[in-house]
Amino acid sequence: MTTDWKTLEQQYYMQCARRQPIVLVRGEGTRVWDEHDNAYLDFTAGWAVNNLGHAHPVLANVIAEQAHTLLQTSNQFYNIPQLQAAQLLIEQSCFDQVFFCNSGAEANEGAIKLARKYGMQHRAGAYHIITAMNSFHGRTLTTTAATGQPHYHAPYHPVPAGFDHVPFDDLDAIKAVTTEHTVAIMLEPVQGEGGVHVPSSGYLAGVKQWCEANGLLLIFDEIQTGIGRLGTLFGYQHFGIEPDIMSLAKGLGGGIPIGAVLAKSHAAVFEPGDHGSTFGGNALTCATAHATLKYLLDHDLLAHAQQMGRHLQQKLRSLQAAHPCIVDVRGLGLLMAVEFSTPVAADVVSASNEAGLLLNPVRPNAIRFMPPLTVTAAEIDEAIDKLNTALQNLALEVSIKG
Ligand SMILES: *Cc1c(COP(=O)(O)O)cnc(C)c1O
């Protein structure tokens, strides 16, 4: 007898997620299998997390080995994987120090706390942080307040104060709300959850200049854009500017939960007792993050991600030419979205599921593509064929109904 997992979820799990009707049981590379052994190409990668694909043997071995050695010590003591992961991240980035935590929201909490303390020390108690409308910064109360999407705030008022939301990709709007109470500007270099929005060239450089001219900290939320997603190790490298603080999570651990906040020395203002975490920086997650980063660098996955990103983009543009319902193809590297003329994303995702392709309905009218960085050209071609089939099937249904 098979268990009815969907009913079990309904009964026992808090109903926060809108789930696809698929129970995933295993994965390998870009593919996953459900409880009935149906195979799917996975272009969601656990929400831009599984950058080396599913069940990567190198990661599986590191996790097993570390589990047999040492999992957790607390930060009352030193542990070696934490320091090795820290060294590699700092050597590969423009930052001077890192703090490890357990998730993206927690990394942003750390970034916000750094900015507030910096404001206390250097800007007469200024604590306002400018963030973008349509941004996504996490689900804790403070990162929900930072997120520029009022519907996420609605059930939880009063949310913490001190966030000024301005339209993304609009430097004048930032200038207009900057006051002596402002301490930082926090942005995703490419908005992910908001629908994959790449800013105009010059916007982020302009924001950086504005920060420098006014003594503000620039915080990049690279939780989704970091670790190769845009084809550079960190998104800021693509745009040729350096933020003062950066948050990471998602791809950092290749599938295990880890977050990080990195800062240049002038912004790394935490002192003993200011911040902390029981699990943050534990040996297991840090050994896995170190192995993920090392694999990505040693196997030139950044160049591969750039190449595959170009291939995916070109394939999506051909698909657009064949399907007038697609009104936009956008993104960078292996973070892409397709926008439709009508809110059909949920239908497209269901039809793609049927065709054996997993996608993310990022907006009611847009779907997001974020495959593992190890994805091959053949897998991209296969995914586009499946999506083409899905779109054809949908159109067929519409015309039959009509
Ligand atoms: C996913 C995401 C977060 C939140 O990360 P969690 O690990 O879910 O807390 C924050 N910011 C961005 C840009 C994200 O994509």
Image (cartoon, helix red, strand yellow):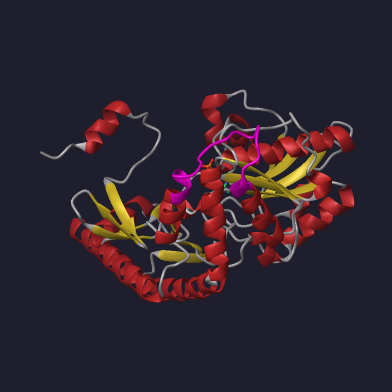
- Residue closest to the far top: 158
Q: Quadrant of the N terminus?
A: top left
Please say if 86 is above or below 275.
below
* 168 inside magenta stretch: no
The image quadrant of residue 32 is bottom left
Viewed as shown, does residue 111 lie left or right of 27? right
The residue lying toward the viewer, choosing from 133 and 17, is 17
Residue 366: x and y in percent read 44, 56
Q: Please report the bounds of the magenta region as a residue range.
A: 65-82
Residue 165: x and y in percent read 68, 41
Please say if 153 is above or below 242.
above
The residue lying toward the viewer, choosing from 178 and 187, is 187
Viewed as shown, does residue 270 lie left or right of 328? right
The image quadrant of residue 238 is bottom right
Residue 57: x and y in percent read 39, 60
Magenta portion: prevailing SS class: loop
The image quadrant of residue 23 is top left
For image coordinates 23% across by 33% down, the residue present is 7
Report whether residue 127 is seen.
Answer: no
- Residue closest to the far left: 1
Please say if 105 is above or below 363.
above
For image coordinates 68% across by 44% down, the residue present is 131
Residue 112: x and y in percent read 70, 38
* Rendering quadrant holding ligand 1: top right
